[in-house]
Image (cartoon, helix red, strand yellow):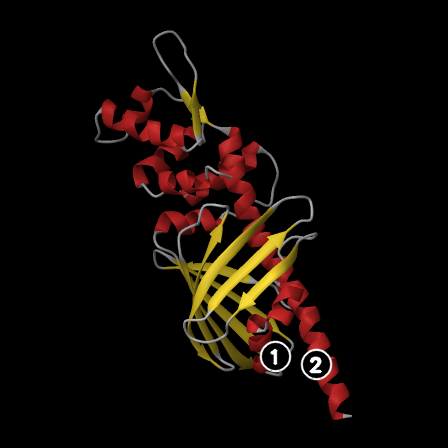
């Protein structure tokens, strides 16, 4: 519907925004109901989420397991901290690759925006370096691009 | 990707990030790398050891010198994971649009 924006704030925050042509209730539900989450939170083409545990309550556990069907996979674990239907979700998460990445504290807000919803996700990383690493787009191929990108991050 | 943890740890230090930025412009010796910093060569060597252990840089022997350069495989592993994160996020939200459209469709169906 609309392009995703991704920007930094301060030393260790990343803000992602995205508009959706649906009510805040629908967008909120699509973020915590496993049957819905499994349909979209899949990342690149070809990946599926065979395991989706989402205990949508404070202290509830999150566990997403992804596979590309070719023997590659990774998983994410996390815990819900706060839930305000249908406007706000606060949780922490970490990727396991298989070693865990630093904890990412995530606050997701859903606000009415015309007939749709503006989603604002605020991620708090442990430090500037982790955030810098997260922000590399890595879209181009080849080492030269990687070097240039790495340099702009530093 | 076993090295990812070590790579993140290595990136968590400003001196090491500056060293990587310098090496992104080309190979350099310890003397050249130490120059911009108010640090002794042993201190720089220690940082280089961490970067090497994380698979982010490699060295070669050139007489008495051991010039360092960025390690293609290490940087690419990091890069691949990061690309997956950003591109994956965009792709996921495109998919969420479809899920939401379907939810809306069903809701209307129930009302009628």
Residue on which disc 1 sits: A26
Residue pictured at 74% horizontal, 82% vertical: B106
- Residue A127: x and y, percent? 34, 52
Residue B22 visible at all: no
Residue B104 numbered mark, or none: 2
**Chain ID, mark 1:** A
Mark 2 residue element? helix
Give x and y (percent) for residue A23.
61, 81
Q: Are marks 1 and 2 in contact (CB under 8 Å)?
A: yes
Instruction: Report which quarter residue A94 is drawn in.
Output: bottom left
x, y percentage for residue A153?
Answer: 43, 44
Disc 2 crowd, CA 10 A, few/some/many (<14, 14-19, 20+):
some
Q: Is residue A54 above or below residue A24?
A: above
In the rendered image, the residue lying farthest to the top is B63
Front residue of A94/B94: it is A94
What residue lies at 55% left-to-right and 76% top-to-bottom?
A28
Asked whether the residues under marks 1 and 2 belong to the same chain, the reply is no
Q: Is residue A59 left or right of residue A113?
A: left
- How many marks the image carries: the answer is 2
Q: Secondary structure at mark 1?
A: helix
* Quarter of the C terminus of chain A within the rendering: top left
Q: Is residue B76 visible?
A: yes
From the image, which quarter does the N terminus of chain A lie in?
A: bottom right
Rendered view: A73 above or below A24 = above
Residue at (22, 29) in percent of width and height:
B39
> Image quarter for residue B67?
top left
Quadrant housing residue A31: bottom right
């Amino acid at each position: 519907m609309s392009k995703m924006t991704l920007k930094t704030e301060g030393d260790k925050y990343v803000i992602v925004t995205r508009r959706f042509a649906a009510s805040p209730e629908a967008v909120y539900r699509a973020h915590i109901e496993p049957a819905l989450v499994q349909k979209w939170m899949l990342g690149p083409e070809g990946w599926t989420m065979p395991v989706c545990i989402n205990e949508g309550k404070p202290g509830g556990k999150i566990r997403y397991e992804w596979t590309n069907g070719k023997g590659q996979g990774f998983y994410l674990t996390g815990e819900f901290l706060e839930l305000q239907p249908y406007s706000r979700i606060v949780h922490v998460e970490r990727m396991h690759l298989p070693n865990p990445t630093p904890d990412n504290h995530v606050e997701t807000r859903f606000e009415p925006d015309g007939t749709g919803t503006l989603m604002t996700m605020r991620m708090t990383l442990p430090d500037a370096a982790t955030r810098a690493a997260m922000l590399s787009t890595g879209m181009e191929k080849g080492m030269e691009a990687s070097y240039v990108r790495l340099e702009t991050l530093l | 990707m076993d090295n990812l943890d070590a790579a993140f740890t290595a990136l968590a230090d400003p001196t090491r990030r500056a060293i990587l930025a310098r090496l992104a412009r080309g190979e350099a010796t310890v003397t050249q790398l130490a120059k911009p910093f108010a640090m002794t060569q042993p201190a720089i060597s220690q940082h280089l050891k961490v970067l090497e252990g994380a698979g982010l840089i490699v060295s070669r022997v050139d007489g008495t010198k051991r010039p360092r350069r960025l390690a293609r495989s290490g940087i690419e592993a990091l890069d691949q994971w990061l690309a997956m994160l950003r591109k994956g996020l965009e792709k996921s939200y495109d998919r969420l649009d479809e899920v939401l459209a379907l939810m809306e469709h069903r809701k209307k169906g129930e009302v009628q």
